[in-house]
Amino acid sequence: MPLAPRPIIQGNQYSKVLIVGQAPGKLAHETKLPWNDASGVRLRKWLGISTEKFYDANNIAILPMGFCYPGKAKSGDKPPRKECAPTWHERLINSMSIEHILLIGQYAQTYYLNDKLSLTERVTNWKSYQPKYFVLPHPSPRNNIWLKKHPWFEDEIVPHMQRVLTKVL
């Protein structure tokens, strides 16, 4: 690992919504605050919730696939370390009151859904994962092209997800 391990997770026994993403970025590592970047701003907008509600562990649990910053790759960050999710996710989730799980990006979706579909295929067929899962692209600015090619995501899925989460939170 390029930096000393600093696991970044959030949640408690009252958490109702679980966000599973890739791994903390360098800024999250430095500030000890998950989704503390442009991706987090877009994610909170998609969820339709305030920063305060997002960082309230009684509402939102955050368990990335890798708990620590994995380092830089040619394009973006390296993939999450493989040992975190199998070692910790089930144990931690079983101690929470999770009603909905948001699977953000290919790594989370592949692990939890155990299928061979692409991210676009999963997001296109999002209703088949309801009511437990919401399958989302990563909110990174790097995905602006994907979002422009698939405007139905923000037109159809985001408002539905906001309605569901408003009831739960």
Image (cartoon, rainbow, N blue to C red):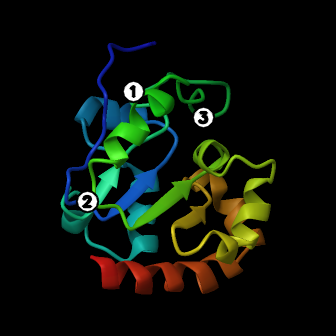
Residue 68, numbered label: 1
Residue 126, numbered label: none
Instruction: Give the residue pinned by disc 2.
Output: 15
The amino acid on which the numbered mark 2 sits, given as a three-letter code, is: Ser
- Foreground mark, 3 or 1? 1
Mark 3 in CB contact with mark 1 (< 8 angstroms): no
From mark 3 to mark 2, how far is it between C-alphas?
30 Å
Instruction: Give the residue pinned by disc 3.
Output: 76
3 or 2: tag closer to the N-terminus: 2
- Foreground mark, 3 or 2? 2
8 to 6, vertically: above or below: below
In this view of the protein, which residue sits in the foreground, 42 or 137?
A: 137
The amino acid on which the numbered mark 3 sits, given as a three-letter code, is: Gly
Residue 14 is situated, as x and y percent measured from the top left of the image, at: 20, 60
In this view of the protein, which residue sits in the foreground, 17 or 32?
A: 17
* Quadrant that contains the N terminus: top left
Which type of secondary structure does the marked residue at label 1 adopt?
loop
* Quadrant that contains the C terminus: bottom left
- Foreground mark, 1 or 2? 2
From mark 3 to mark 1, how far is it between C-alphas?
15 Å
Residue 41 is situated, as x and y percent measured from the top left of the image, at: 39, 61
**At 79% across and 63% down in the image, what residue appears?**
121
**At 54% across and 29% down in the image, what residue appears?**
80
**At 49% across and 37% down in the image, what residue appears?**
65
3 or 1: tag closer to the N-terminus: 1
From mark 1 to mark 2, how far is it between C-alphas?
21 Å
In this view of the protein, which residue sits in the foreground, 168 or 68?
A: 168
1 or 2: tag closer to the N-terminus: 2
Q: Is residue 42 shown left or right of residue 144?
A: left
**At 42% across and 87% down in the image, what residue appears?**
163
The amino acid on which the numbered mark 1 sits, given as a three-letter code, is: Cys
